[in-house]
Every structure is written in structure tokens, then in C-alpha cells.
Image (cartoon, rainbow, N blue to C red):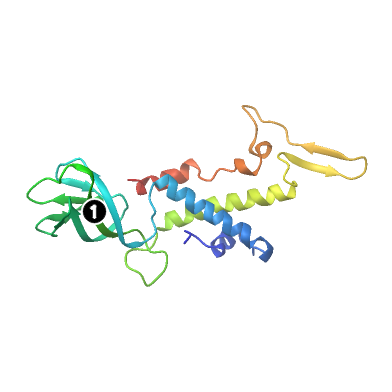
Amino acid sequence: MSFCSVADLEAYLQIAIPASKLGSAERAIDEATATIRNYCRQWLELVEDDQVTLDCLGGTKLLLPELPVLGVSSVVEDGKIITATTGYRLGASGILHRIGTNWTRGIQIVTVIYSHGYRLTDGAVGDLLPEDIVQVCVRAATRAYQAGLRAEEAAGVPGLQATSLGDYSVQFGSEQAGGSSETMLGASAARMLLLSEKDLLNRYRP
């Protein structure tokens, strides 16, 4: 599922998105959601009983890759089942602490089944997706959606500002100091994430 909805875009823009543009709005939301996941290097959405097999460098700490960790169902180390509380304990920030010994050093040697992430709807375990992630998704999706509308108005020609029929003429936007403007580069140049939005998302990166 995506991190926001078409209704969220409509509320942000204070307009009703026409039925003919719903596909464009949904695609923009999907792109924004994927961009947030890629930037955070996290799936973020709730996954229950996910199985992951990890490399281990030894020591007493083993970091689970997806956060937040909601619970661990089982741990198998080098083919042997490790018991909770006596063999390991789940600490803060997704760290599994080995009790009484070190984790076995090796490649793909520890298999963990655990639940992680935020719920996107009511009726599931865990916390709701944080509002700051939702709002970043709304703003990023809005920019992508509006960029598509601008491209459609310009007939897909980057930088096109005006046309006329009589004695056919075309007017393009001028390049700004320091390089081409986003208008000249086209809809693909629309920024998916601004620096201020990345600052908000940094807390969710491992």
C-alpha cells in the first residue's frame, strides 16, 4: 500500500481531482512512496512474521534490518533454535542481544522471523505510520502530479510557455543563471524529495 491517498492530495491542493486524472495521481503517490522507502532504506509498512537470514560478524549484538521491530517469533543460529530470554533478548533499535555467549560468526548463519514496520490502516498491530512520513509523501506526490499536468499542457515539450496558430510561433522559457531551469528540463526534473523533507525522514533511516 501507499503512504497517502488521492483524498490526501485533494485536501492538500484544495481541489477535486477529476476522474480522468486519478491514474496520474495514483502513479504520483506510488512514486513518492517508493522514493521514501528507497531514501530511508526501510520498507516502513507493517510486515508480520517476516523471515530474514543474516550474515553475522560475531559479538553479542545482531542488528535486524527493518525497523521498528514489533516482536521476534523465532531465531535459528547455525541450524539450532535459540530460546528467547535465555538465549537472546530484543533490545532497542532492533538489536538482538545474545545472552551468555557471542553470536556465531558466519555468512547467512542466523535466521530470524519477526514483525516490523508501521500499520497503514486501523485494525492491525503496531503504531500507525507517523504523520511526518505521510505529509512528506503528500507533498512529494503533489509535485510529481503537478509536473505531469504541466507537461500535458506543454504537449510534452520542455520549457514551452506559449504557442499561437496564426503565423505559427513557439515561445520557450529562458535558461536561468547557473544552468537550466526545471521547466527547461521537463517534468522528469521535478524533485521528489526536498532537503527539508529528507531532514524529516533521516530519523527513520537505520
**Secondary element type, mark 1:** strand
Residue at x 66%, y 60% (from the top left corner): 21
Q: Which quarter of the image is occupied by the C terminus? A: top left
Residue most extreme to the left: 100
Label count reads 1
Can you give x and y, in whole percent of width and height, for residue 79 in the image? 17, 54
Q: Nearer the viewer, residue 122 or 178?
A: 122
Residue most extreme to the top: 178
User: Which of the 4 image quarters holds residue 70?
Assistant: bottom left
Residue at x 35%, y 69% (from the top left corner): 124
Q: Nearer the viewer, residue 60 or 3?
A: 60
Residue most extreme to the right: 167
Q: Is residue 164 left or right of residue 131?
A: right
Residue most extreme to the front: 79
Q: Return the residue at label 1.
A: 111
Q: Nearer the viewer, residue 50 or 67?
A: 50
User: Which of the 4 image quarters holds residue 179?
Assistant: top right
Q: Residues within 10 Å of mark 1 (few under 14, many from 20)?
A: some
Can you give x and y, in whole percent of width and height, for residue 12 in the image? 56, 58
Q: Nearer the viewer, residue 105 or 168?
A: 105
Q: Is residue 80 left or right of residue 22?
A: left
User: Which of the 4 image quarters holds residue 17?
Assistant: bottom right
Can you give x and y, in whole percent of width and height, for residue 58 in the image? 16, 41
Q: Disc 1 residue type?
A: Thr
